[in-house]
Image: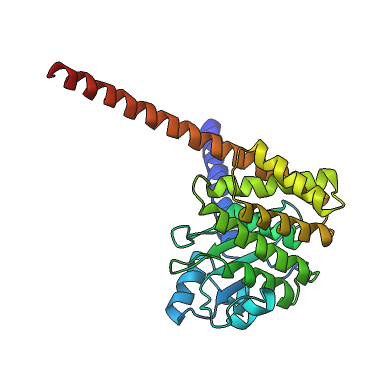
Amino acid sequence: MLKRLGLIWFIAMIALGFSMNGVAKASGDNSTVIDEKYGKPIVVTGAALSASQKAEVEKELGVDDANNVEEITVTGDDLVHYIPDGNRNSNMYSSAKITRTDSGGVQVNIVTPENITEVTADMYKNALLTAGIKNAEVEVASPLKVTGHSALVGIYKAYDDSSKSGDKLDSDRTEVASQELNVATDLAKKEGLSNEKVTQLLTEIKQEIADQHPATKEDIEKIVDDKLKDLNINLSDSDRQLLYDLFDQMRKLNINFDSVKSELSSLSDKLSDKINKAAGDKDFWQSVKDFFQNIFDAIRGLFQ
């Protein structure tokens, strides 16, 4: 009898534990904690979006309740504000959600990669580091196929307009960061270069700037030339000049990349792994192609 009562008590305790755990989970799942230090996550949507497209984008960005985010709209006027040579009449579709954090650096996730055709997550991250953004989770989305450049403008505006964004971004840094993104996407279109290779180049040049603290334009040119040689990248004189001018602007602004050295190093390692894997995959499929080509050649030889 005592054994039976003990067994019943044991089963009851287990059932109660599961029940309380389920209640706790349900309670946790249905509540959203607002960070009182940084405020609500900021959602920036392009002004060109229709109501249905905006709803689609917000769903992609994980916005279940508009009351739990701060909403901002980005327009062509914002584009020319942050990128002076931009087109005021541009249609702004790229959208983003920014959640500030205490640590972890800048993390970027493109939640609709099929619709962001030129800018990669690593390109965004690199530009945001240049702009002076630290410790933030950034998600980017678009309902249509777009290059993705306007998302950067939206992120800048989020920091400047948000009621709890913290420090305002330096306009000179945001402008040079936008130029960096343009250079990155332009170079990635060149024959023999990939998105990863271009981003690796820009990242490692920044690492060298952090290590060497170049004092003159000539110092910048040497860093660029040495890195192009190290990575076996051949550029035209005009493309090389783009890099000289871009990084000399960063030098003049005295951008301190020392503070993000670890992030730059991590990004560089990640890109190297991607490039090596891609090269390995290419070699594998080339060997498969060569194998079957040799078989076909051998068969053809039998009939000659």
Which residue is the extreme one toward the front? 237
Where residue 137 appears, x then y in whole percent? 65, 58
Residue 176 to residue 214: above or below: below
Where residue 81 appears, x then y in whole percent? 68, 79
| Apparent side of residue 237 relative to residue 275 in the rendered image (left or right) | right
At x 55%, y 73%, the residue is 65
Can residue 75 be seen here?
no
At x 44%, y 66%, the residue is 145
Q: Quadrant of residue 239?
A: bottom right
Where residue 283 appears, x then y in whole percent? 44, 30
* Color theme of the render: rainbow
Q: Nearer the viewer, residue 241 or 188?
A: 241
Which residue is the extreme one toward the top? 302
Q: Nearer the viewer, residue 290 or 203?
A: 290
Q: Point out the image quarter for the C terminus.
A: top left
Where residue 188 appears, x then y in whole percent? 54, 52
Q: Nearer the viewer, residue 118 or 252?
A: 252
At x 66%, y 42%, the residue is 228
Q: Quadrant of residue 135?
A: bottom right
